[in-house]
Amino acid sequence: MSIQIIKNEAIELLKKLISTPSFSGEEAQTAALIDAFLKDKLVETKQSNHNIWAFNKYFSFEKPNILLNSHHDTVRPNQGYTINPFEPYIENGQLFGLGSNDAGASLVSLMAVFLYFYEHKNLKYNLIFSATAEEESSGPNGLNSILDQLPPLDFAVVGEPSGMHLAIAEKGLLVIDAYSHGIAGHAAHSTSENAIYKALEDIDWIRNYEFPKLSDSLGKVKMTVTQIEAGSEHNVVPAICHFVIDVRVTDQYNNREVFDFIDQHTKSELKARSFRLNSSSISSDHLIVKAGVELGRKTYGSPTLSDQSVLNCPSLKMGPGESFRSHQANEFVFISEIEQAIELYIHIFEKIL
């Protein structure tokens, strides 16, 4: 099959995916589309929940394994849309529609590359393609739920909009619910202990503290208080103040040690929502990174989260489109970005397969 036919079919599949709502956790219809597309190519697929995956035709347990992964769920369209988010259309070379940029373009491009190499007999690596669910919500039934059904992975390419540059490191995410406790009382008296004031002491530390270890590609750990709530009446001093801390963790720390350190230096009661979304990275000397750099790609550290966070192997993030378009109204991707991405992916893998 020619590369041009592969490109055309990838773009047509993306249009169908845009036309099919696939909010995170509700991806059954797009899973069916992807499954049918692969089976039409005589590719045997496997499915768990709304995750679809497949192995190259001449898979061998004696070879190392590369995972090509992207997600087919989307966020819900925001109120700024002036077009139908589920009606794909092309204007001035731009394909509009919800999920076109994040991460439909990456998904169909990686699938195209998988199909291009699918029947090659003498690959040095096995290729595993996965189209996974619940990435946008970091839900329990996404990529993380099928990893125990895959063979050991030597490394992975995660498709997300990156301008086809190489995100060789990605910050992890730690979300902490904090509860400051005081003593309720009448605002006119001095017998109470204001939970808000106690919370402010911790918030001030969070605002000003800087973790000492810097990452070459990701910089500093970033802590941000993003929500706060307390009180019910104007004349009642609150006994409890709840606030939320968003922590973006670099590859210099793991989530557990960051949580423990924050807990030691604050007085509030802290509860982490999850520890599993850790930072991820791949060596700048890795063969796939070198292959990309040889083809003019730049390396960088990404502040945004992806399915890399649940992988236990070296991984990089790379895909067509631009990260800043993700979740914006009237989302789009350039047709040329998809076409160029497929060619570039193929050239990179030709260097290592």
Image (cartoon, rainbow, N blue to C red):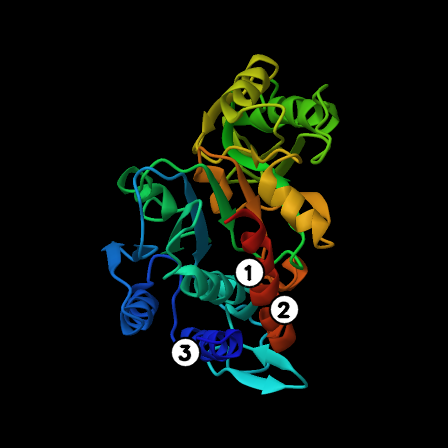
Q: Determine which of the numbered discs, if any, sits on residue 340 in the image.
A: 2
Within-10-Å neighbours for mark 1: few <14, some 14–19, many 20+:
many
Apparent side of residue 353 relative to residue 222 in the rendered image (left or right): left
Point out residue 251 in the picture as x, y percentages from the top left corner: 61, 29
Within-10-Å neighbours for mark 3: few <14, some 14–19, many 20+:
some
Q: Which of 57 and 83 is in front in this view?
A: 57
Of labels 2 and 3, earlier in sequence is: 3
Of labels 1 and 2, earlier in sequence is: 2
Residue designated by label 3: 16
User: Looking at the rendering, which quadrant does residue 193 occupy?
Assistant: top right
Q: Look at label 2 and name its amino acid.
A: Gln
User: Looking at the rendering, which quadrant does residue 154 occupy?
Assistant: top left
Nearest to the eye among marks 1 and 3: give it: 1
Q: Is residue 163 above or below residue 147?
A: below
Residue 200 seen from this side: yes
CA separation, marks 1 and 2? 10 Å
Q: Residue at 45% across / 26% down in the picture?
A: 271
Apparent side of residue 149 relative to residue 259 in the rendered image (left or right): left
CA separation, marks 1 and 3? 24 Å
Q: Look at label 1 and name its amino acid.
A: Ile
Q: Residue at 38% across / 75% down in the picture?
A: 20
Q: Residue at 70% across / 54% down in the picture?
A: 295
CA separation, marks 2 and 3? 21 Å
Q: Determine which of the numbered discs, if any, sits on residue 346 in the image.
A: 1
- Tell me the SS state at disc 3: helix
Q: Residue at 63% across / 69% down in the picture?
A: 340
